[in-house]
Amino acid sequence: MVDGSTGMRAIFEPGWTWEADEKPLLGSPDSCPMRHTGYCMSGKLVVRMIDTGIETHLSTGDFFEIPPGHDAYVEGAERVELILFAPPEHQH
């Protein structure tokens, strides 16, 4: 990308949940503290905002922006493949 953004591929297998698989790796916060912007290449991911309980269903072909304060899980038996974009200030 021209602005220096980078992309990362993320794969979540059937049965993956943020609560069980990511939360412990982040020091067990109440919810995911990160903002995610990306594109769903395959599968179905359900994202739930902790404060409101509102769920967003992402599926193949969807672009998304998820604010901090969420958890998520893979819906169904298909693996989820995402491309996550990071703006230049978040690169290391």
Image: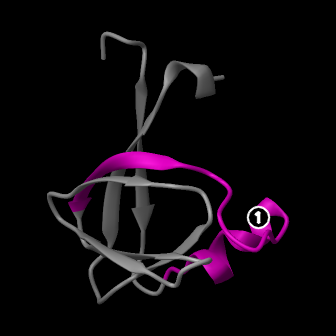
Q: Residue at x 48, y 49 (%)?
A: 36
Residue 32 part of the magenta segment: yes
Residue 80 part of the magenta segment: no
Identify the residue position indicated by label 1 in the image. Answer: 25
Position of the C terminus, as image quadrant, is top right
What x and y, as percent, mark residue 22? 66, 69
Can residue 52 be seen in this snapshot?
yes
What x and y, as percent, mark residue 91? 59, 24
Q: Is residue 90 above or below residue 18?
A: above
Query: As shown in the figure, which amino acid type bears the numbered disc 1?
Result: Leu
Q: Secondary structure at mark 1?
A: helix
Q: Is residue 30 above or below residue 64?
A: below
Question: Residue 44 versus residue 68: which sits nearer the camera?
Answer: 68
Magenta range: 16-41
Other-residue count near label 1 (Cα within 10 Å), few / some / many at <14 / 14–19 / ≥20:
few
Can residue 91 be seen in this snapshot?
no
Instruction: Answer with left or right where residue 4 lies relative to residue 64.
Output: right
Instruction: Answer with left or right where residue 43 lies relative to residue 83.
Output: left
Position of the N terminus, as image quadrant, is top left
